[in-house]
Amino acid sequence: MKQQAIQYVALDVHQATLVVSVRDEQGSIAMRATVPTEAKSIVGLVRGLGSRVHVAFEEGTQAQWLHDVLKPHAERVLVCNTRGRGEGGNKSDRIDADRLSELLRLGSLKTVYHGASSLLTLKELVRSYTNLVEDATRVMQRIKALFRARGIKTPGVSVYRQFKRKKWLDQLEERGARMRAERLLAELDVLQELRPKAKTAMIAEARRQPGWRDGRCSNRRPRLQDPVGLRKNRALVARMRNLPHERCRGFAAE
């Protein structure tokens, strides 16, 4: 019995629509289409192409969702990274989709790992914690910049301490500057209150993953020993190993 030919499907993903390019095994364009970025429409398109469908699309905000939607309905789903290829010439969604389908057919795509659905919670918790640290850092930089703009030096981290704030705020003669500083400090209080909670949740989730153990360093970040099933997920491993240090930029050690 003759095996069914593979259909190579490339998706150029946007918030509202997907631009689709389908190639056959000989490299000819079999179909072009534009479909809504909705699970029902996407699955209907892929299932209508037969049982042997390879799908590729670029890494992005919707990549994990799209991967999970298509995985049960396609023989192969690739999330790829095409950065650094230095493609010149005309640019359009259709051209991008056609180029991607040809690279998929040739096996020339650099894939990004999206296979471990068990890690989705951990990934989100890592992002949450990292965002809180980064947001707090930006707020602290704005506070110091506000004082420096008025010739007031702010050595160390005492400007952030609640019991010293009145002393610092009294140095701001302008009413508007003082009000802005008060709001920035209030924002910092909220971020610093949320950060330990996010960290605790992140570490608790990391402990549930095979091969993870607590590091013995001062900031107690999760450390990877010998991950099972995580070897391809290099981005998450690197992110867990390089989380922002809490001792930096005014954070007190726990």
Image (spheres, helix red, strand yellow):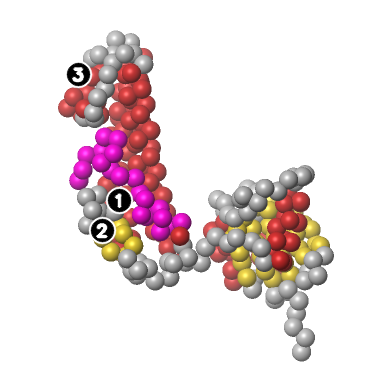
Q: Is residue 203 above or below residue 90?
A: below
Task: List x then y, in percent, for residue 87.
Answer: 70, 48
Task: List x then y, in percent, for residue 163.
Answer: 17, 27
Q: Name which of mark 1 and mark 3 comes first in the sequence.
A: 3
Which numbered circle lies on residue 167? 3
Please give the name of the residue rendered at 74% of the width and 83% of the height, measured from the top-left corner: 3
Give the residue pinned by disc 2. Answer: 215
Please give the name of the residue rendered at 38% of the width and 33% of the height, measured from the top-left corner: 138
Residue 193 in view? no
At label 1, counting other C-alpha atoms closer than 10 Å, the crowd grade (few under 14, some 14-19, many 20 or more) is many
Please give the name of the residue rendered at 39% of the width and 71% of the height, measured from the top-left corner: 228
Horizontally, residue 25 falls left or right of residue 67, namely right
- Distance of mark 1 from mark 3, alpha carbons? 31 Å
The answer to which of 169 and 58 lies nearer the viewer is 58
Look at label 3 and name its amino acid. Lys
Look at the image and say whether residue 55 sits in the magenta stretch.
no
For the record, the magenta segment spans: 235-254
Which numbered circle lies on residue 199? 1
Q: Quadrant of residue 98?
A: bottom right
Task: List x then y, in percent, for residue 86.
Answer: 67, 48
- Distance of mark 2 from mark 3, alpha carbons? 39 Å
Which numbered circle lies on residue 4? none
At label 3, counting other C-alpha atoms closer than 10 Å, the crowd grade (few under 14, some 14-19, many 20 or more) is few
Look at label 2 and name its amino acid. Gly
Q: Name which of mark 1 and mark 2 comes first in the sequence.
A: 1
Q: Secondary structure at mark 3?
A: helix
Task: List x then y, in percent, for residue 113.
Answer: 52, 63
Residue located farthest toward the top when viewing the structure as drawn:
173
